[in-house]
Image (spheres, rainbow, N blue to C red):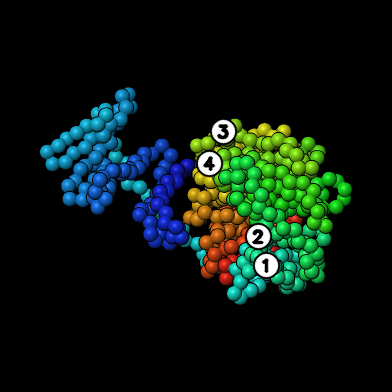
Amino acid sequence: MEDQVRVLHIASTVEAEGCMDTGLGLAERMRADVDAGGEIILGGLIWTEANPETSFKLRRIGSGFSVVDGSGESFAVTLQCDAAMGCGMAVQNTGTNLLLGRPGRAVTSPALRALPLIPEFPPGNSEGPEIHFPGKSITAVAARPTSRVVGTADGMVVALDERLRERWRTAFKKPILSLEISTEGVVVGEESGALSLVDDAGRICWTVDIPWISLPWSNWSECRSRVREIACADINDDGRQEILISNADRRVYAFDLEGRELWKRPIQWGVFTAMWPGRHEGKFTLLGGTSRPSIHGYVVLLNGDGTVRGNMQRADLTCWGLPANLRDLQQADIDGDGRLETITAVDTNCRQLIAYGADGKVKWDCDVGACASALVFSPAAKRVYVTSEAGYVVAVESSSGQRVWVVWIGEAAELVWALPDGRLAVVARKGFIWLLLPSGEIQRRINLGAAVTAIPRPGDHRGPGRNLIIGTADGRVIGFE
């Protein structure tokens, strides 16, 4: 990259909820490019006033900034800089000259190269199969190579084949929150905390109601029972799958395929998320993290009997004053050494993409400009792709964590998926899908016209042996091939 021009991207946004994609309702928004080594001045205005009707306005002028109060009186503010002594600020208005801090040269930034507020993308349509359930809102999805399953807000569960043709449907009493496809059928988690197994003919085999039982420090939970995530794996090496669930009560539960509870484990501190049944030091291990609210951005390791084996954690990711919680996780051999590493997307202040080695120590980390929302590892490309709440998609070399490219899509995307042909599908819940080429070039943007209300959950539902399927608020189910 030595022969390339390096550019710093500066974006300042004041967001009004629901308006990120149009710019409507924003107090101010700008995008500009600044060459490395260049200068830029960012100004902000904070004031306190007993009279709430009094207002001030801040604007750029040639020599700095102008502040105008509610009566129309104007003040010119110029930043002063002396490299040896420090900085100051000159304030001028009619008959008044005031210097705060050190005198020095007046600092003015050159005119910035403005960029479009909203990136322009070629429009496009979805490419895979699609099915519509009129009057329904899709709330949960799960997919494996030969089967798909979706759930709705009114308690309907529908099994589909790989072309999204309906196989069976079954009604439940409460909204469907989570789904998983097991060797014995479909495991269903309801908003009420009920867990059920449905066989391949759509018959409900059993239902277990998990009651809300308080526990110490229940404020780190949702203070209710609801089945947030489901995974299926052989946790005790007996050759049969067991069912693992993350409940909103801050506990992880294990059941057998007959619905008998095997164990439950409270998690410190937060609701378990991004479950990944994997291996650590040669033994079955359930990996996951804690979701908001949480003060830990670590990976929790649970044994097959529910005991806590330990955790993987960067040293700065425990702090009462900073956000630190897990958003996504994958376990894979990312460097070709034959051992499993763990990659995490973390909501924290810096270096939000973290890879841990097989020994549990930090292998590399990378800053993505904001909370890391979702990630995927592509063995074919030997890259990790991650989305950022700042509106970026970032590609990094999986063995080193070095950035390969960064693309700004202008939205916070909650899912990134490596398609079989090497492209990426990036999904935002506001109803947009971006298709990116391996080079990072945006091929097109698909406007679904409705919010995305169901995506594969974080963790192993986004890993090998899974397929991409999404659901919308207006009852559409869209597959990708």
Q: Position of residue 476 (x, y in %)?
A: 61, 70
Q: Identify the mark nearer the N-term, 1 or 3.
A: 1
Residue reaching furthest to the right: 238
Q: Which residue is mark 2?
A: 192
Q: Is residue 445 visible?
A: no
Closer to us: mark 4 or mark 2? 2
Q: Quadrant of residue 341?
A: top right
Residue 173, disc: 1
Q: Quadrant of residue 118?
A: bottom left
Q: Position of residue 396 (x, y in %)?
A: 60, 44
Whether residue 372 is situated above or below residue 25 in the rendered picture: above
219 and 481: which is toward the camera: 219
Q: Secondary structure at mark 4?
A: loop
Q: CA distance from mark 4 to mark 3?
A: 11 Å
What residue sits 67% from the left and 61% below the top? 190
Q: CA distance from mark 2 to mark 3?
A: 36 Å
What residue sits 49% from the left and 49% below the top? 390
Q: Identify the mark nearer the N-term, 4 or 3.
A: 3
284 relative to 30 in the view: left or right: right
What residue sits 45% from the left and 46% below the top? 9
Q: Which residue is mark 4?
A: 323
